Image: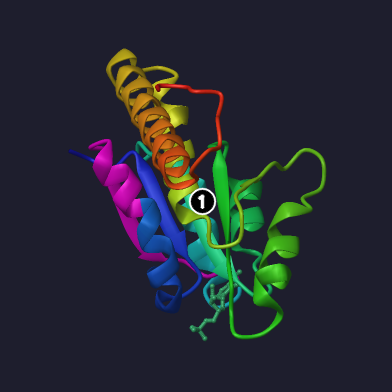
Amino acid sequence: MSPVVGIVMGSDSDWPVMEAAAKALDEFEIAYEVDVVSAHRMPREMITYGEQAADRGLKAIIAGAGGAAHLPGMLASVTPLPVIGVPVPLKYLDGMDSLLSIVQMPAGVPVATVSVAGARNAGLLAARILAAHDEELLQKMRDFQQDLNDQATEKGKRLRSKVEGASGFGFGK
Ligand SMILES: Nc1c(C(=O)O)ncn1[C@@H]1O[C@H](COP(=O)(O)O)[C@@H](O)[C@H]1O
């Protein structure tokens, strides 16, 4: 299967965070590619990657970067594809620098920014983007959401059984 999602990051040191995006796509059997593409360190290659992504068959790009995280925004400026930005937290500033570098894009150049280290949600968002035009994937997403619902209901049950004498709304009894 040729990749339909590109997962790129500023450095291989981002992988421990970005891996969760790949795992989410695995769960939905969505083919992806993974690479290091740095706006700062390899600007020409970064522009080529962004310019060619749609023609190569990608439907969405997940871009993670830490610190002065310009990669997602720069990719968004050269591709017509949806770009999902993942702020990677580094040693200093707790990822606030990465978050603010990605989230405050100028009008006209959108990046869908997830939470700091929120790579799993980036993968799930890419799956939803693809599902909008794919009935089978849409159903998988509904099943996934039902699972989440079941798990949360179970948590409520467990909590109620722990807290003696308390009553709850009683969802799922
Ligand atoms: N933020 C960017 C960009 C970019 O935005 O182009 N390129 C690399 N980096 C970030 O630098 C951090 C440290 O990288 P190294 O571990 O290679 O020193 C990484 O989090 C990377 O995403």
Q: Is residue 144 visible?
A: yes
Q: Residue drawn at (49%, 56%), measured in percent from left and top?
A: 48
Judge whether residue 28 is colored magenta. yes
The quarter holding residue 91 reads bottom right
Q: Residue drawn at (82%, 47%), measured in percent from left and top?
A: 106
Query: Does any atom of ligand 1 lie closer than 8 Å to the CB of label 1?
Result: no
- Seen from the viewer's position, the closer of residues 165 and 74 is 165
The location of residue 113, given as percent across then percent down, is 63, 49
Q: How many marks?
A: 1
The location of residue 125, given as percent across then percent down, is 48, 37
Name, please, the residue furthest toward the bottom: 91
The location of residue 33, given as percent across then percent down, is 31, 53
Q: Residues within 10 Å of mark 1 (few under 14, many from 20)?
A: many
The quarter holding residue 168 reads top right
- SS under mark 1: helix
Q: Which residue is mark 1?
A: 50
Query: In the rendered structure, which amino acid carries the disc numbered 1?
Result: Gly
Name, please, the residue furthest toward the top: 135
Question: What are the residue bounds of the magenta stretch?
Answer: 22-39
Q: Is residue 105 left or right of residue 82?
A: right
Name, please, the residue furthest toward the front: 165
Name, please, the residue furthest toward the left: 1
Quarter of the image where ligand 1 sits:
bottom right
The quarter of the picture where the C terminus appears is top left
Q: Residue drawn at (72%, 53%), measured in percent from left and top?
A: 103
Q: Is residue 105 left or right of residue 88?
A: right
Q: Is residue 121 left or right of residue 137?
A: right
